[in-house]
Amino acid sequence: MAKDRTVHYDGPAGGWGSLRGIATVFGKEWATPLATETLARQNKPGGFMCVSCSWAKPAAHHPFEFCENGAKATLWELTSHRCTPDFFARHSLTELRRWRDHDLEHQGRLTHPMRYDPATDRYVPCGWDEAFSAIGRELRAIDPKSSVFYTSGRASLETAYLYQLFARLYGHNNLPDSSNMCHETTSVALKKVIGASVGTVVFDDLSNCDAMFFFGQNTGSNSPRFLHPLQEAAKRGVKIVTFNPVRERGLESFTNPQNPVEMLTGRETAISSQYHQLRPAGDIAAVLGICKHVFAADDAAKQKGRRVLDVDFIAQHTRGLDAFEKMVRATPWETIERESGLSRKVIEAAAQVYVEADRVTAFYGMGLTQHRHGFENVAMLVNMLLLKGNIGREGTGISPVRGHSNVQGQRTVGIAEKPELVPLDKLAQQFNFEPPRDKGMNTVEVCEGILAGRVKAFIGLGGNFVRAIPDHGRMEKAWSGMRLTVQVATKLNRSHLVHGEVAYLLPCLGRTEEDMQASGPQAVSMEDTFSNILGSKGRRKPASEHLRSEVAIVAGMAKATLPMNNKVTWDRWVADYALIRDLIAETYPEEFHNFNARMWTPGGFYRGNSARERIWKTQSGKADFTVPKTLSAAGFEDAPGRYRLITLRSNDQFNTTIYGYSDRLRGIEGRRDVLLINPGEMRRNGLREGQVVSLVSDAQDGIEREVTGLTVTPFALPDGCLGAYYPEMNPLIAVAHHDEQSGTPAAKSVPVRIRPGGKAAGGKPGESAGAPA
Ligand SMILES: Nc1nc2c(c(=O)[nH]1)N[C@H]1C(S)=C(S)[C@@H](COP(=O)(O)OP(=O)(O)OC[C@H]3O[C@@H](n4cnc5c(=O)[nH]c(N)nc54)[C@H](O)[C@@H]3O)O[C@H]1N2
Ligand SMILES: Nc1nc2c(c(=O)[nH]1)N[C@H]1C(S)=C(S)[C@@H](COP(=O)(O)OP(=O)(O)OC[C@H]3O[C@@H](n4cnc5c(=O)[nH]c(N)nc54)[C@H](O)[C@@H]3O)O[C@H]1N2
Ligand SMILES: [Mo]
């Protein structure tokens, strides 16, 4: 039989392709002196911090400390296109709701504050004062607890701090943020088992480890600057072992686009020494298999008077090994093989690397967190690391690779729906008020609240909430039940087109732009994935003279809503952000003392991590081994015709921002309305390449959810699973389908069925896919 054809890409990540990737989206526009001058300041001390991912900004930086996707993100913000009142006069919101995500953002930067006018179904320009006083009036008229203040992970520490203060002075803890859809699983699981809610790895550990284990993180597209230290590690002989249902190019091979020799000779570096395509949601079983081999290797070593386990570490620092070991030894290999989709042989090969390496780091992303049992995924990875003392020692540790550029930092300064994570007494004393103590709503609870009609007002500080959340079709319909919606944004997106009775769209400065206030130009700060705090200063002329900074917009809304309080001086704070940093330092002295002086430290200042010091702030006072309650993270049974759908990001998007239609590193070009499936599954289903099908949700809750117009595309995936793009697939995810412990939507194993037949996608790529049902 002829070998099955699958769509794929053979070239390395990086290389000339990455430069072409930028040029395809931006044409000649990207090579202007102004753009290159701005890019040269990206992620450098005294410059501005990339608006794309939160990968660390090393003190010893490269001449160009940006990557293909960082450049796209910056250029996307610097665009010369403008989305003006004129544009809104020409298009009703009903019409714009039929546009694609890419075409909405492609209109360019928002220029004026806008108010929704129901008579014409259009946004019309309004003054800032008018907007603020209307928002204040509306908020004062409702119960604060029926309102929601959402944050997407881009806003600075200064903005985030003022925003949470506004929420608490007003009277609620409803502060969901994008991390509720992302690494909330991490925040809950790591806090529970090692007592620190963020990763323990720092930059130096990358050059001091002997092996790296990668689970469900697509470095090549989502944190490409990480490819540089990965390449260095691979060249040093560090063993890199990857578990991912998809063969992601960046974890296979890389050519450094900033190295002329590599570029001209086309020399690539192989990254992963082992690559295991496990079933989606099979990680608990795979890691359990690794642990099983570690116990077996330890048994064998004992015969020779040696140990594989770090027995001293285990005795001194952990709790719960016995129950865990018992469970692992009792689990048969057949079960592990079935649940992981991997053979005993390959799991043992991975485990052998773990056994032999003295210092091991583990990295993970959405492939572990976005499952019904994501918590168990993360806790299981910690189990593995604890066996050999691979936390709290140089060259070791666990590293959730965080998403948005300041998503981790926002949590650090109080954006949290969980009041126990916030020093409320301190805030009470600083600002002379009684903060709300009841638990606020996370993202999933907000969705439920909107569906039930309980939420009356929604303020979105950045992001594209309606598009990013699950159950898109149902959520859009319920959205207009709200009284007030306010969106603070740089570019037009779908969340601006669905709205409450009273709605405002408020345009803000981007991070590359000069933020001029009464005391002079301002800087802001953020926290990277390794917990370093860094300053960022924009220098570009703002996209419009009507823009305000996020700090000023939050303060403007707050001032119009709240009664006078002489401890709360919004105008002074807006005039000089250094005063806000002083407030942050007062609330969080341990992490932020001397904040203003330290924020320009090259590479940032480290805010510390107790688990890294082997101080375990858990209930038991130790690092906890945990017994997983299931071996599959999916949370639903296998059944004939039921697939596990992985929702994927392409190389040409940042979350809901779609730059273009090239998923270069997977070989998918020109369209996003694809259904990825392996050739064997195609045969079993009688499907042929290019056929158009629908996906329907198999959530078994009686609700019909469908996405139509998907083109069958042969792709090297494991059996029993499918791949398709986020956010177009979000109508298929039930709100109730989330990690049980943290509420993170389970977007990496969604139960679906294929429904053959259906209309072709029409003229433009991606047109019908994801249109609300
Ligand atoms: N260019 C760009 N950069 C970004 C973003 C972007 O959209 N574009 N988004 C930013 C944000 S907010 C975030 S959170 C991060 C997201 O970055 P990642 O954490 O990399 O998230 P995804 O791309 O959603 O998926 C990660 C990987 O998980 C794999 N996977 C799926 N299911 C499983 C599973 O069950 N087990 C395992 N082991 N692997 C699985 C997928 O094949 C994929 O390679 O990136 C950030 N950086
Ligand atoms: N099915 C599925 N769903 C997912 C995921 C998945 O993997 N699969 N991933 C989840 C994850 S990890 C995340 S983080 C969420 C993302 O959810 P969000 O963070 O809500 O969404 P983004 O797409 O990042 O938001 C993009 C918008 O932010 C605005 N923006 C850009 N820059 C700025 C700025 O500087 N200031 C302000 N105020 N606004 C700005 C622009 O208007 C732009 O349209 O989606 C989640 N949803
Ligand atoms: Mo994210």
Image (cartoon, helix red, strand yellow):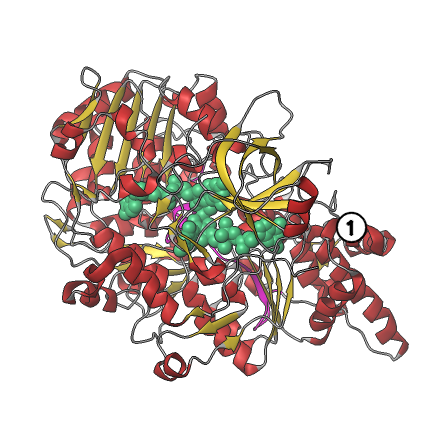
How many numbered marks are there? 1
Q: Is residue 67 left or right of residue 686?
A: left
Q: Is disc 1's CB within 8 Å of ligand 1? A: no
**Predominant SS of the magenta segment:** loop
Residue positioned 40% across, 41% down in the render? 766
Residue 568 in view in this figure:
no
Q: Is residue 291 left or right of residue 229?
A: right
598 versus 263 height, above or below:
above
Residue 453, quarter of the rendered image = top left
Frontmost residue, 724 versus 337? 724
Frontmost residue, 20 versus 699? 20
727 in the magenta segment: no
Circle 1: residue type: Arg
In the picture of the structure, the residue carrying the numbered disc 1 is 338
The image shows residue 101 at horizontal and vertical percentages of 34, 39
The image shows residue 732 at horizontal and vertical percentages of 53, 32
Q: Which residues are magenta?
A: 391-416
Q: Secondary structure at mark 1?
A: helix
Residue positioned 63% across, 30% down in the render? 698
The image shows residue 632 at horizontal and vertical percentages of 71, 45
The image shows residue 339 at horizontal and vertical percentages of 75, 49
285 versus 264 height, above or below:
above
Q: Is residue 769 left or right of residue 594?
A: right
206 versus 400 height, above or below:
below
Label 1, residues with CA under 10 Å away: few <14, some 14-19, many ≥20: some
Frontmost residue, 545 versus 270? 270
Residue positioned 81% across, 56% down in the render? 325
